[in-house]
Amino acid sequence: MKSKILFVLCLLTGLMFINAGLDKFLHYMPMPKEMPEKMVKAFKAFMEIGWLMPLVGTIEILGGLLLIFGKTRALGAIVIVPILTGILLANISMAPSGLPIVFILIAVILWVIIENWEKYLHLIRK
């Protein structure tokens, strides 16, 4: 039962990241009207750096896809950690109202990391 719950959570989290990554290329989601001005300025600055958003979008799509499948879930969690760190810091500094969703995503990724801990051990052992 626990593995089924984890699969559903990883599927939903993976799809969220895939959606966010695709939006970086296709721009199909409108910006929320109630977005703080600081965050709007930050997004505009990120768009000025031509390579940054496609890079982030590619990593989000790749991480989301890896997270969905059980064999690659451990790698997907590690790929998503830097993106999730950026999302957390952006929400802490500019839009605290988004923190509950960020904490849910962090909890899912931490669960994946804890469940796959043995796969990471060879990276830190001598």
Image (cartoon, rainbow, N blue to C red):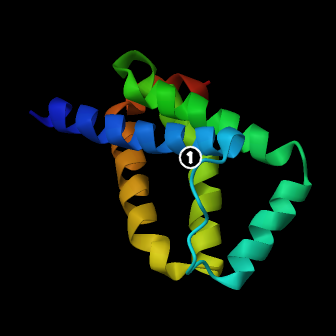
Where disc 1 sits, the SS reads helix
The amino acid pointed to by label 1 is Ala
Whole-percent x and y of residue 35? 60, 77
- Residue at x-position 77% and y-position 39%: 54
118 above or below 92? above
Q: In the rendered image, which quarter is residue 78 located in?
A: top right
Whole-percent x and y of residue 26? 67, 40
Whole-percent x and y of residue 115? 32, 35
Pointer 1: what residue?
Answer: 20
119 above or below 15? above
- Residue at x-position 39% and y-position 43%: 13
Q: Name the foreground residue: 52 vs 108.
A: 52
- Residue at x-position 35% and y-position 48%: 108
98 above or below 63? below
Q: Name the foreground residue: 32 vs 42.
A: 32
Whole-percent x and y of residue 94? 64, 80
Q: Is residue 17 left or right of residue 6?
A: right
- Give the crowd class for mark 1: few <14, some 14-19, many >=20 residues within 10 Å: many
Q: In the rendered image, which quarter is residue 40 located in?
A: bottom right
- Residue at x-position 40% and y-position 33%: 117
